[in-house]
Image (cartoon, rainbow, N blue to C red):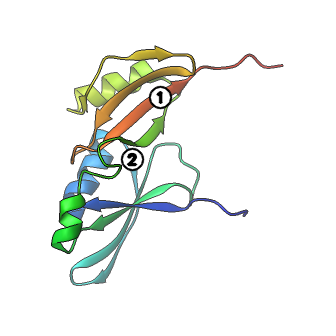
Amino acid sequence: MPAHLAAVSYLVRDYDEAIAWFTQKLGFTLVEDTPLSPDKRWVLVAAPGALAGTANLLLARASTDEQRAQIGRAAGGRVAFFLHTDDFARDRSAFEARGVKFREATRHESYGSVAVFEDLYGNGWDLIELKRTPSA
């Protein structure tokens, strides 16, 4: 397999809290949950439809005051994550029904439909359905 982005660290307060939020609110899959020590685990979650072994979130429990202070600040207040969908209306409706907080109404941009939502720690995410281009 060519080089690819396998995972991105995502700071959490608690492993189980984060696993529950991602799997129950966003429909992510728990890929792996392996204990490494009494207080450390290797926890990977993946968005629905993600290719195996690519672009997982590594849920990393913050273990210092400095790390705990960064929870919810993945991009310094900017949108940190971009979740693509093939049906924006379906997913926004499902997310809202499960209690996901959207910061704005749906916008229809030149590239597609988008709205910012917050994860359990307040990080910003774009939910995006890209415009389909006609096949040649």
127, above or below 11, in the image: above
Q: What is the distance, in whole Å, between disc 1 and disc 2 at their CAs? A: 16 Å
Residue 13 visible (yes or no): no
Which one is in front in this view, the residue at disc 1 or the one at disc 2? 1
- Mark 1 falls on what kind of element? strand
Q: Which residue is mark 1?
A: 128
* Residue 82 screen position, x and y as percent: 45, 39
Report the residue at 58% width, 51% height from top.
Answer: 51
Q: Amino acid at mark 1?
A: Ile
Label 2, residues with CA under 10 Å away: few <14, some 14-19, many ≥20:
many
| Residue at the extreme right | 136
Report the residue at 47% width, 43% height from top.
Answer: 48
Residue 88 visible (yes or no): yes
* Residue 115 screen position, x and y as percent: 37, 25
* Residue 32 screen position, x and y as percent: 41, 66
**Residue 59: which quarter of the image?**
bottom left
110, above or below 57, in the image: above
**Residue 66: which quarter of the image?**
bottom left
Asked whether 32 or 58 is in front, the reply is 58
**Which of pointers 1 and 2 lies earlier in the amino acid sequence?**
2
* Quadrant of the rendering where the N terminus is positioned: bottom right
**Residue 124: which quarter of the image?**
top left
* Quadrant of the rendering where the C terminus is positioned: top right
56, above or below 118, in the image: below
Q: Amino acid at mark 2?
A: Phe
Report the residue at 45% width, 38% height from top.
Answer: 83
Q: Which residue is mark 2?
A: 28
Q: How many marks?
A: 2
